[in-house]
Image (cartoon, rainbow, N blue to C red):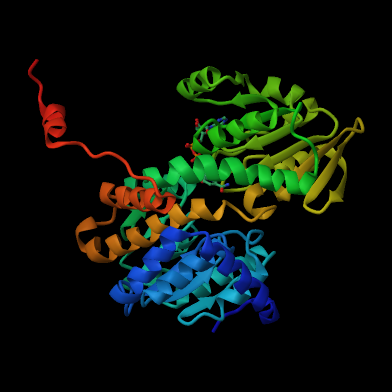
Amino acid sequence: MSKIRDINLAGKGKQKIEWVRKNMPLLRSLEEEFKVTKPFKNLKITISVHLEAKTAYLATVMAIGGGDVSVTGSNPLSTQDDVAAGLSTYDGVNVYAWFNATPEEYKEQLIEALGDKPNIIIDDGGDLVNLLHTECKEFLPSVMGGCEETTTGIIRLKAMESEGLLKFPMIAVNNAQCKYLFDNRYGTGQSVWDGINRTTNLIVAGKNVVVVGYGWCGKGIAMRAKGFGASTVICEVDPVKSAEAIMDGFKVMKMSEAAKIGDIFVTATGCKDVIAGGHFNQMKDGAILCNAGHFNVEINIPDLEKLSVLVKEQRNNIMGYQMQDGRWINLLAEGRLVNLAAGDGHPAEIMDMSFSIQALSAIHMIKNHKEFGNHVIDVPEEIDNKVANMKLKAWGVEIDKLSDEQKKYFKSWQL
Ligand code: NAI
């Protein structure tokens, strides 16, 4: 039995789900395949992923494939109540989530979703895995394994694996090429700016944008900032990525320098306190701060609160912090993922690829979990290639194939 905010919102939610369905041709073709093959028959699946329309469509595809699907969010601010209501009306799906749940309610929702005793989990950031290893150990026996969506979740899984604590296998979906090359780079690159622009309604051209972290997400965010006409600065701790950023045409400097000149700051490191303490003292009046990393720890909000004499909402989803000298610093979406907490997340065509990998990886886990042991498993190359081929087909693009002679040439070593 679903627990959502308001079932009267279901119509609007179903409209959103139908819109993304029309724009997710890969998942649509898997839906057709799963109607016949029923890969999830007699299996229970718990999904904890940002609960907006694309996630909802993935849940319905898994239900059509025979699964009993329980869905919860992976961040209280990214859950959309209309989508949760719409999704709860589909056969084979239970939803436990509402927007702006308190930390206690949010945890309760995850526990309820696990209470349906899943065989497979789809996690985003590691909350389900964490509970299954701590407060919800009683649900462990039925779990075959699962899939993890994001970089931060995989870092945590690898830490558990190396300490010998992981109790079931997990597939590192984020590390598939068809995930990070597209979702983290182009998806985050576009949707972060969608979130910032719709929330602030300010111009980006001519501004100094500071992107912290030049990984896959940071590269996408910086690339699009440049496209908007911003003067873009990168802050990094990795020397190779710093050099790459310079060759890509960006300025690279320490945060203590960037803090003085930035108009808009975007963090995308997966690390904590990348903007903290003294940085706030150096910022310009009106500076805008936001985060694209998984957790709201990248901007040290307690430090910001300590330094401010007044905290006041400036506009929906923008909190202003006034410093002692009168300067205002603006924080978007409480420092949570700005593209999801202040937007609709990645474009549908991007999540089409990521979620096709999720669905195919879940099947890979069902078929092979006994051989995997309690390890973090890579997505096999065949799944990456299948999704890339489906994407090319959807675009109507054909590519050349290696001839037998060319294959032989690649394997030869003699002059
Ligand atoms: P990545 O590992 O490719 O890049 C992170 C970069 O940050 C690295 O280059 C690292 O050297 C740098 N970094 C780490 N600590 C730093 C520090 N203290 N100061 C400056 N740079 C630092 O990771 P990726 O894939 O770019 O993900 C970044 C974060 O974004 C993760 O938390 C991930 O889970 C999240 N994510 C968010 C998405 C969204 O929709 N907003 C989508 C995909 C990932």
* Quadrant assignment for the N terminus: bottom right
Residue at point 47% right, 65% down? 58
142 displayed left or right of 405: right
Most extreme residue toward the bottom is 1
Most extreme residue toward the right is 326
Q: Is residue 273 above or below residue 359?
A: above
The x, y position of residue 282, in whole percent, is: 78, 25
383 displayed left or right of 189: left
Residue at point 34% right, 56% down? 170
Residue at point 64% right, 56% down? 344
The x, y position of residue 178, in whole percent, is: 40, 46
The image quarter in which residue 207 lies:
top right
The image quarter in which residue 240 lies:
top left
In the image shown, does 56 or 105 lie closer to the viewer? 56
Q: Is residue 24 above or below residue 225?
A: below
The x, y position of residue 42, in whole percent, is: 32, 80
Q: How many numbered discs?
A: 0
Most extreme residue toward the left is 414
The answer to whether residue 92 of the structure is visible from this angle is: yes
200 displayed left or right of 152: right
The x, y position of residue 160, in whole percent, is: 38, 50
The answer to whether residue 138 of the structure is visible from this angle is: no
Residue at point 53% right, 68% down? 56
* Quadrant assignment for the C terminus: top left
191 displayed left or right of 206: left
In the image shown, does 125 or 159 lie closer to the viewer? 125
